[in-house]
Image (cartoon, grey):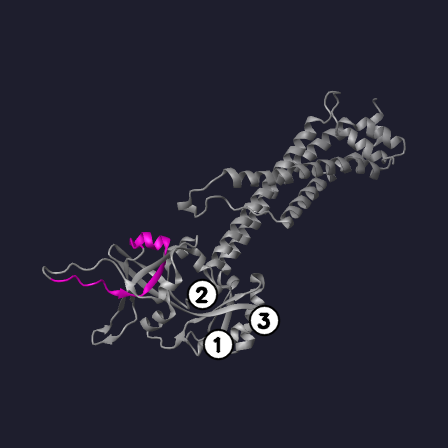
Amino acid sequence: MRLPYEVFIGLRYLKAKRRNRTISFNTLISIAGVTIGVAALIATLGIMTGFKEDIQAKILGTNSHVIVTSRTGEAIKSYTELTDKVAAVPDVVAATPFIFKQVLLTSDSGSHGVVLRGIDVKREATVTEIAKNLKSGSLDELERLGPAGKAPPAPDGQAAEPPPQLPGIIIGKELSLRLGAFMGDRLNVVSPVGPISALGMIPKVRGYRVAGIFEAGMFEYDSSLAYVSIKQAQEFFNMGETVTGIEVKVTDVFAADRTAKAIEEAIGFPYWARDWMKLNKNLFSALKMEKFMMFVLLVLVVIVASFNIVSTLTMIVVEKHREIAILKAMGATGKAVMRIFMLNGLVIGVAGTAIGIPLGYGFCWAIQEFYTLPGDVYYLSHIPVHIKTFDVVIVGFSAILITFLATIHPCRQAARLDPAEALRYE
């Protein structure tokens, strides 16, 4: 099949004048500019998507997909029946009650304010990943009493008293290092809400034994989160047979908002169901905006590269004005001349995109394989990368569109060339 003469002439104009070179230097520079821009876009979007999904996985590993609480802020009574009712909603995998309070943890070497969660030991693993995040200990230890620390020294001639039997508590790795408390050590939980005396409200204090240490991978959770059994939390906070809310795990995390609405319809007022995206709306909105802004900024790299295309085609038009005039004198229309130079720009854009996409994948592979991060600073040993097909399609389409738009001015300049003026002094 014979190619149209516009294609033949357009491809010929991209070649170099010298016989030992197949492509002109200006064409190579234009292709290289588009290639670098496309590769940088794909690598950056892949890294930002990887970080977003890594943060999302860590949030969902520590928190449930949906949380049911009371709109009035009061504790929930008859939570067993409510939990069963929530678990019966379609697309709900599991549900379990929890208690959520702020307390102060103290040890022999320091103190720190934390969020104390009371959990159902038997059902918590069906909703969150706390059991998988444990580096030492187990959830079952929360329901057992055990000795904490060393026995106090006994007076001379008397038998040493055994250390007190204390309930278990699970703390984060960073919190453990900050308090200097490790497996088997004693921690005191201090609640600002306690009994009222003549002097006012007295803080309530209870001792606990470190029964486990977890690492969620996020500093916020590892440094300010602690777990006890739900029975211990009810006794300590004098909550009786009430809880703060219900944790829910759903089948599709990205459809958690629809499941939350179905839960609200099933249980009615005054209960309120919120999905994980609403609870972390500010964080994910910031990540989404950051990714969009990085896309816009790196598109400028492709736009700068398109200036090379404009200059290259303009130089070709000036250099080939005699050939263009002869073509028009032989009957070529202005649109045909425009197609010749538009083809030049499209070839540069497609070639740069075709080389840039695998180069971007190669950058991401090299970053994952050879670039490491200090784990004690970033909680990551390697940079997470996830390249989405949609992002690659958008990047490729944007690059080709920008390079096509860059051909408009040189093409119009070539189409307006007057054959008589171009050949007058030839």
User: Residue 340: x, y in percent?
Assistant: 80, 35
Secondary structure found at label 1: helix
The residue under label 3 is 90
Give the quadrant of the C terminus: top right
User: Residue 162: x, y in percent?
Assistant: 21, 63
| Label of residue 82 in the image | 1
Q: Nearer the viewer, residue 8 or 26?
A: 8
Q: Which residues are magenta?
A: 158-182
Figure check: 139 above or below 43: below
Secondary structure found at label 3: loop
User: Residue 243: x, y in percent?
Assistant: 41, 73
10 Å neighbourhood of mark 1: few (<14), some, or many (≥20)?
Answer: some
Secondary structure found at label 2: helix
In the current view of this chain or complex, which residue is farthest to the left? 157
Residue 357 drawn in magenta? no
Q: CA distance from mark 1 to mark 3?
A: 15 Å
Give the quadrant of the N terminus: top right
The amino acid sitting under disc 2 is Glu
The amino acid sitting under disc 1 is Leu
The residue depicted at 70 percent of the width and 44 percent of the height is: 401
In the current view of this chain or complex, which residue is farthest to the right? 330
Q: Are marks 1 and 3 in contact (CB under 8 Å)?
A: no
Residue 165 drawn in magenta? yes
The residue depicted at 65 percent of the width and 48 percent of the height is: 394
The residue under label 2 is 124
10 Å neighbourhood of mark 3: few (<14), some, or many (≥20)?
Answer: few
Q: CA distance from mark 2 to mark 3?
A: 20 Å
Lower position in the chain sequence, tag 2 or tag 3: 3
